[in-house]
Amino acid sequence: MATHPDNLRARLEERGELLEATRLRYRALEKMLRAFFWKDRVRANLELLREVALAQPQVDTTLEAVARRAAVEGWPRRSAPMVLLAEVARLRGAVAAAVERRLIAKQKPALLGEALLKLEEEVLDAGPLLGRRLWIQAVEILPRNLQELRAACAAGEVFERVFKRPAAEGALPFDAVEADEVRRALLVADKALEALWSRLERFDGTGRVSAFLEKRMKRAPVRPPRSGPELLLHAAFWHDLARARLRALLESRLSPVMPREEEWPELLGWLVVREGSARVGLPTSEVLSEGRAGLLEVAAELAALSRARPVGPWNEEAAWVRLWTAAQRAKSETGADAERLRESLRLFIRLRGQGQTPARLFSSGRPELAGLPGGQTGREPEDLPGLVQRAREAAGQPRTGRVSG
């Protein structure tokens, strides 16, 4: 028994919206591909071409599912759903045939979605007509529905929200939740922007479009972005600003160690947690080895102790123990960062807690502190734990005034 057309329309409500939108897109795309100056038409409407290409797997699945159900249930051929189904299938064939004719490649992709993306590459490779302005070329190369562009914009929104607002001097500009958002946004933005600049390099044969956008990238956005290039510039500006702010923040909190950029995501959350409890160690990961994590802990402890006098309850002995424990983790580390830390400790040992030394780490008027484990005597040690021990011993000596020279 045949199903009533009204019931068929109700059953196809969700799929019908997709098929109706696809029908309109197929019509517009087929018309463009049949035009005499079809490349110019396609260049001006690459977003439409990409929409059809990206939606094609879902459209093919829907066409197959609806056709199978119509055959099983015996839908009337003249019912509205069947008419729509037949029209979309016919237009799909027409678009596929037009793409087949326009593609230059000898080996043409079997799937329509892939063939459309290949056609996009060939059109962009052909380049614009002489006299086309750079901004128009940028709009053509960067359609708004590029997945990488959407990813870069999502990351840029995170950077703008976190780093646009004012932050108190010396305070972290984010909480734990926002630190995790910034961490994930960094990873997304790096990959997305790299892909977008590679796309520009791929289709901008002269390099003039890329140079044009790179120059404008330094300007702060003054209005909401609309076109593809504007979206790229907006995302790139906030990405660069976020990186500059993070670099300054990490340098101030971890000087004299210079954190590597691949370590940034690992450090952000830890610095937030450390604000509440300095006893929390830096976990190891694929990026951070045990020794490297210990080296960064030593740097964070030294920077915190040397920045200012303590606020609220503070146990100087516990701070020295944390510093020595972190130095034990980093004992085997070598390289420029490790040497800079050792030099910082040697400098303090030479100053011997006098007036030139930072106030917080070596405050006056305190009771004598107990020694650290594994105390060393004799000449100045070379390893980090030994230097921390010797610095601790120097800190226990009376302050005798400023030293000149």
Image (tube, rainbow, N blue to C red):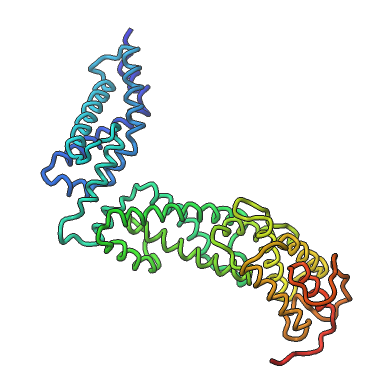
Residue 253 seen in this snapshot: no
Residue 163 seen in this snapshot: yes
* Total number of numbered discs in the rendering: 0
Looking at the image, which residue sits at the far bottom? 404
- Left or right, residue 239 beside residue 310: left
Residue at point 55%, 65% (across, down): 246
- Left or right, residue 31 beside residue 391: left
- Left or right, residue 142 beside residue 281: left
Residue 235 falls in image quadrant = bottom left
Residue at point 42%, 52% (across, down): 192
Q: Quadrant of the N terminus?
A: top left
* Residue 105 or residue 356, whichever sits in front: 105
* Residue 227 or residue 97, whichever sits in front: 97
Looking at the image, which residue sits at the far top? 1
Where 85 falls versus 279 (above or below)?
Answer: above
Q: Residue 276, position in %: x, y?
A: 71, 60
Q: Residue 404, position in %: x, y?
A: 71, 92
Q: Quadrant of the C terminus?
A: bottom right
* Residue 43 or residue 281, whichever sits in front: 281
Looking at the image, which residue sits at the far front? 379
* Residue 114 or residue 91, whichever sits in front: 114
Q: Residue 242, position in %: x, y?
A: 50, 63
Q: Residue 386, position in %: x, y?
A: 78, 69
Looking at the image, which residue sits at the far left? 36
Residue at point 27%, 20% (across, down): 82
Residue at point 33%, 50% (across, down): 144
